[in-house]
Amino acid sequence: MERISWIDYAKAIGIYLVVLGHLSLPQIWSDFIYSFHMPLFFLLAGVTFKTSYDTITFLKKKFYALVVPYFCFSLILFIYWLLIGRHYGADVANGSSTTVLQAIQHIFYGFRNSIYPSPLWFLTCLFVCEILFYFILKQKSIILITIEIGILLTAGLTLQILGTEYCPRLIWNVDLACYYLLFVALGYVLQKKNFFQFIFKTKWSHGFSFLICALIFFGSFYASCVYHEALFKNFIDIIPAIAGSLAVIQIAKFIPSNKLLSFWGKNTLTLFGLHIIALGFIKAFIVFVLHYDLSFINNCVAINAGISLIALFLLMPVAFLFRRFAPWAIGQKK
């Protein structure tokens, strides 16, 4: 499949927001980023989703594209945590008592918000999402497909509302996959119905649709903040997640040819998998070389925005080396 530039640019914007979101930001900025940055990646996965493979071929492709990179980057992050992460930084500051055995267990469970491999939850969750969606599409009936996605979405949201106090976390984020399945399905449908070709047809239609998405996003985001403690907040959150993702896609379409964003978009997996390490070394440089206390970057959007850019630039040579010498580790062929 020929690469589509706006998809790479949207991924580049998304990965920048992922890195920025893992730094210390004012709550409103953190809420803003988290309202749509991960749904964006699931929606884009739906845009590029293919159903032309037989079951065995599909499972093999997804295993090599997502599961193999998950364990490769988990191993790298585990070694980093073992040698450095558990002795400095957030783990020490938060009084973490995670044992080596627990860390290894977290890798195989694939839970979100565990220790250092935690950013990689996306890979296992996407793997489950795409497997579910592949078999749902086997039904052929639009009504059955809609009902099944609706049931899984309701189940996923219910589990999130109940939380870990009442429901155990499910291995490989199956509970989250039931929720994010909606965005994979939406991206798939929009692409199949030529939605993007339609809104990109003219500058007028493009600009108008972007304005609508932006207005819906800010309106629903405000509602989500107002009803922050409400039980049905998770249902409200779907609206800014969709509107924000579509707004980013349209911003990406506005961007002229850009080699830097294209590179980031093509290497999001490496950037995603290793940005925690890059941020760790940048913070170490600030503390041990520049002799600044990290508190000076807390809640400073401008400084953290710059640190996020530096982290992505630092990882570019690493991404190149992976593509050149270990493409299998990032789910690619030689």
Image: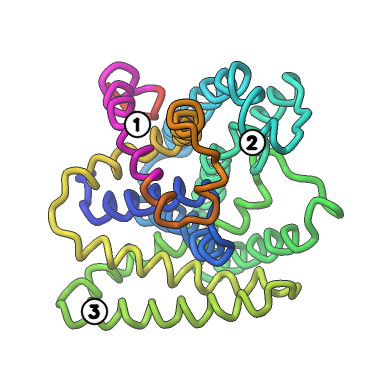
Mark 1–mark 2 contact, CB under 8 Å? no
Alpha carbon distance from label 3 to label 2:
43 Å
Which of the pair 303/268 is nearer the observer?
A: 303
Q: Which of labels 3 and 2 is toward the front? A: 2
Q: Which of labels 3 and 1 is toward the front? A: 1
Q: Which mark is residue 281?
A: none
Tag 3, which secondary structure? helix
Tag 2, which secondary structure? helix
As for residue 321 lying within the magenta part, the answer is yes
Alpha carbon distance from label 1 to label 2:
21 Å
Q: Can you identify the residue that label 1 sits on?
A: 315
The part of the chain drawn in magenta is: 307-328
Q: Residue at x 41, y 82 (%)?
A: 215
Q: Is residue 60 visible?
A: no
Q: Can you identify the residue that label 3 sits on?
A: 207
Side of 193 where 104 appears, left or right: right
Which of the pair 190/88 is nearer the observer?
A: 88
Q: Can you identify the residue that label 2 sits on?
A: 90
| Amino acid type at image mark 1 | Leu
For the view shown, which residue lies furthest in the right direction?
166
Q: Which of labels 1 and 2 is toward the front? A: 2
